[in-house]
């Protein structure tokens, strides 16, 4: 397995957090992708996915602000579920866990959830993800974080990600978020820790609270019909705008009401 680490060098605290992470990762199998200034996810994530395609083997993609149990634990997860995409940091509040045992006694669960802090992609997955992204309008890709794009990709191919439970990767909450998510209630893993990584057997499916399958289905229907999602909410079909940006009726009404009120 090769470890590909996204590094926001420009952000406070990231040089130190990367240094701590690199102390754990195998030096000969780790590559760092450095952003020296703020970049949108559609930029830095593409570089990492393209490198994964070049490598042609299983990769673990990590952010520079995470803590991990160990590389051996991550690799045990991948070995237990080969050819599967793994979300290594389960922040999904719908996954109810107790102590070191997963949902309802399971040590694995499934969800249409690409966990931004860390994932495992088997050979071919990154190429498929890039191909799917290329079918989306730039107005959507350029405004959407890589995890939400990957959620839509997983739904499009009807293959949820697997959560190993407890999670082998977690956000280091002492490092400031580059997106202002410091106080987000779902920023850290539900349960973080090492476990005996047995192969998954009929893992239960769990809806992702902020990207339920009903919403993913609707978004796919809109984009496949050649229409645009609302630039503001990205949850409904746009009806007012131009060829690259459109706003839905609900958001138009909200903006009109705000204008009449005279601002926030």
Image: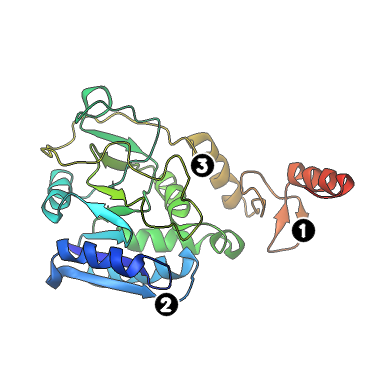
Percent of width and height locating residue 8: 39, 69
Q: Secondary structure at mark 1?
A: strand
- Tag shown at residue 241: 1
**Of the residues under marks 2 and 1, which one precedes in the sequence?**
2
**Which residue has dot 3 on it?**
216
Percent of width and height locating residue 127: 34, 63
Name the quadrant containing residue 206: top left
C-alpha separation, residue under disc 3 versus residue under disc 1? 23 Å
Question: Residue visible at 21% across and 23% down?
Answer: 105
**Of the residues under marks 3 and 1, which one precedes in the sequence?**
3
Percent of width and height locating residue 67: 25, 53
C-alpha separation, residue under disc 2 versus residue under disc 1? 34 Å
**Which residue has dot 2 on it?**
36
132 is higher (above) or lower (below) than 252? below
Q: Secondary structure at mark 3?
A: helix
Name the quadrant containing residue 81: top left
- Sort mark 2 into few (<14), some (14-19) or many (20+) by Cα contacts within 10 Å: few
- Residue 124 appears in view: no
């Amino acid at each position: 397995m090769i470890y590909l680490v996204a590094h926001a060098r420009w952000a406070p605290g990231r040089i130190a957090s990367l240094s701590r992470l690199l102390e754990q990762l195998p030096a000969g199998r780790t590559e760092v992708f450095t952003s020296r200034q703020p970049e949108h996810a559609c930029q830095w994530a593409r570089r990492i996915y393209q490198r994964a395609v070049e490598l042609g083997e299983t990769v673990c993609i990590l952010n520079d602000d995470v803590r991990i149990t160990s590389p051996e634990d991550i690799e045990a997860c991948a070995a237990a579920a080969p050819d599967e995409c793994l979300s290594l940091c389960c922040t999904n509040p719908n996954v109810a866990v107790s102590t070191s045992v997963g949902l309802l006694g399971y040590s694995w669960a499934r969800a249409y959830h690409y966990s931004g802090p860390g994932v495992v992609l088997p050979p071919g997955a990154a190429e498929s993800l890039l191909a799917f992204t290329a079918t989306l309008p730039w107005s959507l890709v350029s405004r959407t974080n890589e995890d939400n794009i990957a959620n839509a990709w997983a739904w499009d191919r009807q293959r949820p990600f697997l959560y190993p439970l407890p999670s082998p990767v977690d956000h280091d909450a002492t490092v400031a978020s580059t997106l202002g998510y410091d106080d987000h209630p779902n920023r850290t893993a539900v349960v973080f820790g090492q476990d005996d990584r047995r192969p998954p057997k009929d893992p239960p499916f769990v809806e992702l609270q902020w990207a339920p399958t009903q919403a993913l289905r609707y978004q796919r229907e809109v984009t496949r019909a050649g229409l645009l999602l609302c630039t503001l909410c990205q949850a409904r079909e746009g009806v007012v705008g131009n060829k690259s940006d459109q706003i839905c009726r609900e958001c138009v009404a909200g903006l009109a009401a705000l204008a009449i009120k005279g601002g926030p």
